[in-house]
Image (cartoon, coloured by chain):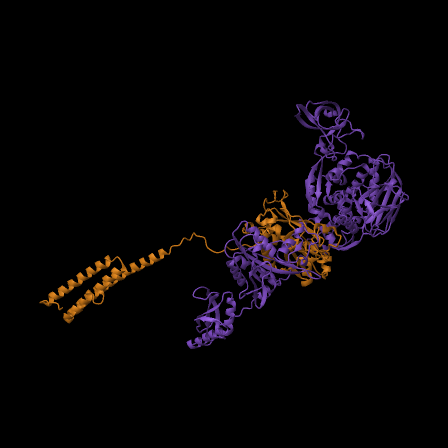
Amino acid sequence: MKFSYNWIRELVEDLDYAPGPLEHLITMKTAECEGIEATGALLDRACAARVESVESIPHSHNVKAVVDAGRYGVHTVVCGAPNCRVGLITAYVPVGSKVIDGVESQGMLASAAELGINRDHTGVLELEGRAAVPPGAPLPGCVPDSVIEIDNKSITHRPDLWGHHGMAREVAAILGRKLKDPVRAGILPPGPGAIQISIEDYALCPRYSALVFEGVATRPSPLWLQYRLTAIGLNPISNIVDMTNFVMAELAQPMHAFDADLLAGDTIFIRPARAGERLRALNGEEYTLTPANLVIADASGPIALAGVIGGAATSISEKTRRVVLESANFNAPSIRRTSAALKLRTDASIRFEKAQDPANTVRGLARALDLLNEVSPGIRVVGGVADQMKAIPTAPLIDLPLDWLESKLGRAVETAEVRRILESLEFGVSETAQRRFSVRVPSWRATKDVSIKEDLVEEVGRMVGYDTITPQAPLFPSVAPPPNEGRKFQHEARQIFIDLGFTEVYKYSFISEESALAFGYDPAGHVRVGNPIASDQALMRTSLLPGIRHTILENAKHRDAFRVFEIGMEIHAQPEGLPVEAPHLAAAIYDRYGDGAAGLFELKRAAECLMPGAQTCPAEAAPYEHPARAARILWKGETVGRLFELHPTLMESGRAAILDLDLRPVQAHWTADIRYAPIRRYPSSAFDLSVIAGLRELAGDLEAKMASLAGPLVESIEFVRQYAGPPLAEGTKSVSFRLTAGSPERTLSSDEVGEIRARIIEGMRRLGYELRV
Amino acid sequence: MRQRLPDRMEDFILMLVSSIEELESRALERIAAARTAEELEAARVEAIGRKGRLDQLFKEMGKLAPEERKSAGQRLNAAKQRLESAIQARQGEFASAALGARLDAEWLDLTLPAPGPRRGHLHPITLIQRELEELFVSLGFAVLDGPEVETEYRNFDALNIPADHPARDAQDTFWLGGGNLLRTHTSPVQVRGMEALGPPLRMIAPGRVFRNESVDASHEHTFYQIEGMMIDRQVSVAHLIYFMKQMLTAVFQREVVVRLRPGFFPFVEPGFELDIRCLLCGGSGCPVCKQSGWVEQLGCGLVHPRVLRMSGIDPEEWNGFAFGLGLTRLAMMRYGIDDIRWLQSGDLRFLEQF
């Protein structure tokens, strides 16, 4: 929301703060300012001037004009505007001399857009037909201004701050100045309204006030009004419409003017739309409505979308002679829903969705009447104010114990100071007991903003200044926080992987259907984003692998070999309720060269560093896995993940080994219960055995078979090496193991060791293996 | 062959003495002249080896009278000791020369690169997050987790942002259907913390959040926040400022100047925006603080009584403060990252700098 500094100054007595310091005060005490912009800079030098003569300049589209600027003298200017003609009263700005097209131009004639009055830059400003401005006189009501932009988010809760009067009240309270009320309520004529109002549901429309005018003459607004609206970003249209926008920008009360002669019947209905009713709006769009949309209607149908936008059919035009001026109050959520459903946010809907003050409607009409008398001379009110409402709830009283207030702020506050602050913001204050106030909330703060004593902590706190509060350590018992084992584990896992050379990546939680399909995942099985940022980011990842693959392909453009990992959530849809979020660790080793085996074993080593004793068991490959290089990872009896090479068809170059772990079971088994075991005192004996086996027999299986034959005295069986080639028969290999035997009670005799060895050899032979001994 | 006996014993002794002297000086010459361990060994064998020349002289001594034999023996032994120590000294020389030669042959170029992968790198957000977790745990705060997919209730309603509340505009939401959404802030973990642990409560919750925003150099639809909450019997704004200063001083590793100004967040009352004096220009104004001298850091406030009540906590008995700050923003400030998109790029050229 943009605020005109000049406007605020008109509403605060003796405002002697410049825009900069004022902006700072507003930021510190009320709402966040996003910046100040100067507007109308030329207006401090601009004056009215009469074009005395116009002469063309050879080979130029510009003309040479002589203008009479009254007390600023007669000057020759070069002007390119098509409307520059003898007798025109326009705006002259002495900006210094400059030679244009060989002619010395002493200053310039300015368009309304250049001056900041409106957006018309088709020609120089025309002052005829309005109040006569003598040459040399300044443009009436137009002086340079500063526009203070307030962050809309910071006034979401403050319906009153959507108008200059509300902001002026803050400024007056901050500076201890007096607030001026632009509204003269007494000028409204008494008596019944000249139009009937029928509100179907007061919950949706708590109040509807209207005033009928005749003798309307539609024309451009005076310069000062155009300039005001332009300065705060509104577009001047015509005197009637501009006046409604002015009242909205001043009092935060949106208004709408209907051409009374285009209304059917003598009653305005405020009711939910009937299903399928249509309205062509002022923006040229046609909307098909539902009963969720509140409309303003006449006997023939909708004439406006309540609180959002007016209809085109009954809008103000040059032919308008009679006007129905609406100043109403609508239910905030209802307006917000309609505005969201129709994707139509307007200056009116933005205000109404903040819950405007129903007490404000008639004030708006009084202000409008004052302004219309000025901008539409000859206008007359017909009848009194038509005003339908349910009883406006009396402002709530809040019990405010001042000691409690102090304990919340962490700072002492004087009784008198609290009273002064609250009263400056027009809260009603009465002292019900020692250090205890009963506070009445003003109507413009009572709709949603202020209802409990905590709200008053903010009012007092911001006004005394939060910088007056000294930081203070609390005097609470020191308690060790409950541990978060999951996070501890994940940090440990990260440490292990970076120590092994892996770099951590973060990838998006969104994947495309295409990449789901590339991995053989069913897109239908994914949690789907209803309103994705792009169609290729519509699915929630059920695996970290598409992201890891993306990381591999991207980095392979710059590197020949690298290691990466990610710890992140897989999101799995459930029939109902929240999805299951499974923390996973996915790690990859990429190598442009080589046969890919080294990467797989390095990843296996990484898995063993994280999970000592983890085993790899060959498993049927998933569609994205190399069909002959895929294994399950088994740890402490549970499958915890997979080790595989990414299917070569998913790669552009090189090979990628991948480890994908479900961290839930890993974490569950991770907290090791460490118990010391005494060191063995008797020496062990070792011997080697080499088993002849088929080429694709698994060393792990051979080891397991030997282990089953070994008996209790064998302490360990370790793979030593394997060999294939002559003199071994084709299709076979020799796998060597070192076995260690020993006893905690004694040294084994060589006979005992020999017996163990013989038993294993015999057992393996019975299983069909030849041994090289 | 028998040696001819001298006529007189005295002459014999004189001859023996001169033989010892001659033998010793000749042997010493050979020892000194030896160029290899082998030559030295040959000299040793010849001089003092079994059946060596000295040994022969010992044998000759048998011809002497006992008293003369003693003095000759002493001479011989002394000569033998001198030769032995000369040999030992030279042996030592050769051994150390041999060791030196062997070790020299093992010369290595240690400027060659070490084989194997370099240490990997933690993500910058992990670094900041871990730092803050450690800080808050040391201050007695629990670290809590919440899901990335949340219910509309916990993300909004339970935080005093009912449907049709304009505050929902500030948080463009990814909707998933079934009343679920991608959490737009870590604040729902407040609700989970209150529900699970109850008062008194000190907690933080770092995590990934989502906003439906187009991505550019300073906007992301996926970013990280850290949420914090403290519920106790008499928590004040002064306590809040104290903890925020502690945190920011730790994060920026120097004393920071903070200021509070009004800010609207429906789940706190009063609510604040907290700024720190620009660390780059010290408050005099620069592009980073947009010439204001202050940089917005976080939103915070005293927990709204309605939020407490919705989580089953009596606001007349307990109250507290809450805060939320952007980890992503913090990481960008700390490391001077000028484009937010690097953070989720997975690009090693970026990640290897941390």
Question: In the rendered view, would you say B62 is above or below B262?
Answer: below
Q: Which chain is orange?
A: B
- Examine the rendering and report whether any part of residue A695 can be seen: yes
Nearer to me, A308 or A303:
A303
In which quadrant of the rendered view does residue A746 lie? Answer: bottom left
Quarter of the image with the C terminus of chain A in it = bottom left
Question: In the rendered view, would you say A612 is above or below A384?
Answer: below
Nearer to me, A495 or A49:
A495
**Numbered marks: total:** 0
Q: Residue furthest left?
A: B7
Residue A491: x percent and y percent?
Answer: 57, 59
In which quadrant of the rendered view does residue A669 lie? Answer: bottom right
Quarter of the image with the N terminus of chain A in it = top right
Residue A531: x percent and y percent?
Answer: 70, 52
Residue B66: x percent and y percent?
Answer: 15, 71
Question: In the rendered view, would you say A228 is above or below B310?
Answer: above
- Examine the rendering and report whether any part of residue A178 can be seen: no
Q: Residue furthest front?
A: A730
- Specify whether B73 is left or right of B266: left
- Specify whether B191 is left or right of A649: right
Question: Residue at left 21%, top 63%?
Answer: B47
- Colour assigned to chain A in the rendering is purple
Residue B134: x percent and y percent?
Answer: 58, 58
